[in-house]
Amino acid sequence: MSEFAYRDGVLHAEGVALPRIADAVGTPFYCYSSTAIAAAYDEFAAAFAGLPATICYALKANGNQAVIATLARRGAGADVVSGGELRRALRAGVPPRKIVFAGVGKTPSELAAGLAAGILQFNVESLPELAALNQVALAAGKRATVALRINPDVDALTHAKITTGKAENKFGIALDQAPAAYRAAAAMPGLEVAGIAVHIGSQLTGLEPFRAAFRRVAELAAALRGAGHAIRRLDLGGGLGVAYEGGERPSVAAYAGIARSEVAPLGCELVLEPGRRLVAEAGLLVARVVYVKQGTGRRFVILDTGMNDLLRPALYDAYHPILAVRAPAGGAVLAPVDIVGPVCESADSFAKDRPMPPLSAGDLVAFGVAGAYGAVMSSTYNARPLPAEVMVRGDDFAVVRELQDIDMIIDQDRLPDWLAPPALARGAA
């Protein structure tokens, strides 16, 4: 969060005071630092310098066009998991030959779209998907470049809902089934087998699971080459975590060092798929206090943002730092409060017994480390509009997604013929 700091007692994003943005766009809003995004990418690029590595940003972390374009301008490719993300990447200027299409449930139409775009490769996760892609490629008169995603059965030591490399997870092809899968792929005329893909989970804060997974990938690559398969590319996935609760982050340089020692000797092209590590610390969610309510034994700070805007605490019991946008006066006493949202769900709670300075209705607060899996997972539950998104660069800022209008939500619905027109005009109470 180095690009977010207090100046004269007010929290800034780079050179812009957050209250200035709140006055211009309303609350809640997400705020991204262009400088922080670029710096995170540059750290990754420097760590893998000298290796034939392509850094493909994982769009699922944050799919805003301005975020994707910022990274594309630095040289990033894209890791996409749907036809929609493929279109986002292309629209933001990511070169097709730097796009990897992953995901367990690609439909024939999505496979066809990736093939038509001329992407780098498909990360195929099952034998049925191999057969479907082969049919799509033959129908188009093309060959699809593939890497088979292998499930190495490595415990990522992360939250159960974001681990992807254990045998019981839905992702990838089991390691012991890999030789047969590669034989099947090699026999399909519409496919060109280029490599191996692996991804063991998200928000890994220890590096040893990566070492174990990369070692198994290297062993598999050697065995497959011995069986006659031309393995020339290794997709090592992503998952490197951030420090939501402060402290040391896992080192990108040390992570790259593991890749250098475990897989670089094979001489393969490498693909990296960082997502969270590139954008999480580059974003804030800013909200306004609506009420402060004293309950029986608990004090609640009720915000104008809820689990529909930031789902991670409700979904994963995730921690986010929460800061008063205006620094508390010297000597202010911190007191435990529950910080909650307005959504009609008991799960709509961001923090319990969080020590906070005194807050009143109208005050602004900022959720830190919110640039990943924040806005991209937001919804209109309770007919709550999607929040605005803003990008800051130096002393300037731009709205990169407008605060959604409620009529935009309602107008997506259509009344069937047998229902009379609504009695109330739009906007009536």
Image (tube, helix red, strand yellow):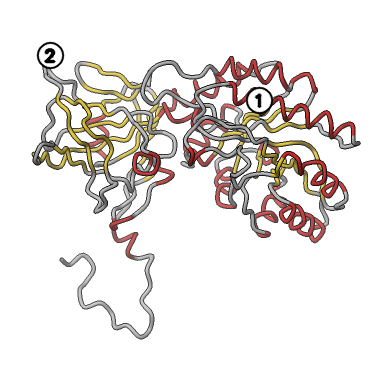
**Earlier-in-chain disc, 2 versus 1:** 1
Q: If the image is split into quadrants, where does the C terminus sit?
A: bottom left
Q: Dot 2: within a 10 Å radius of its alpha carbon, few (fewer than 14), some, or many (20 or more) residues?
A: few
| Residue 128 image position (x, y, % from top left) | 73, 56
Mark 2 vs mark 1: in front = 1
Q: Viewed as shown, does residue 134 lie left or right of 316? A: right
Q: Viewed as shown, does residue 80 lie left or right of 421? A: right
Q: Amino acid at mark 1?
A: Ala
Q: Amino acid at mark 2?
A: Gly
| Residue 392 image position (x, y, % from top left) | 37, 29
Measuring 23% from the left and 32% from the top, which residue is drawn there?
Answer: 365
Q: Viewed as shown, does residue 37 lie left or right of 52? A: left
| Residue 279 image position (x, y, % from top left) | 46, 30
What label does residue 212 carry, if any?
A: 1
Helix, strand or loop under label 1: helix
Q: If the image is split into quadrants, where does the N terminus sit?
A: top left
In this view of the protein, which residue sits in the foreground, 26 or 60? 60
Residue 400 placement: quadrant: top left
* Residue 49 vertical position relative to residue 182 in the rendered view, above or below: above
Q: Viewed as shown, does residue 24 lie left or right of 121? A: left
What label does residue 7 carry, if any?
A: none
Q: Whole-Å distance between the Cαs marked 2 and 1?
A: 49 Å
Give the residue at the far bottom of this rendering.
418
Q: Dot 1: within a 10 Å radius of its alpha carbon, few (fewer than 14), some, or many (20 or more) residues?
A: some
Q: How many marks?
A: 2
- The residue to which callout 2 is attached is 330
| Residue 198 image position (x, y, % from top left) | 66, 35
Measuring 80% from the left and 61% from the top, which residue is drawn there?
Answer: 139
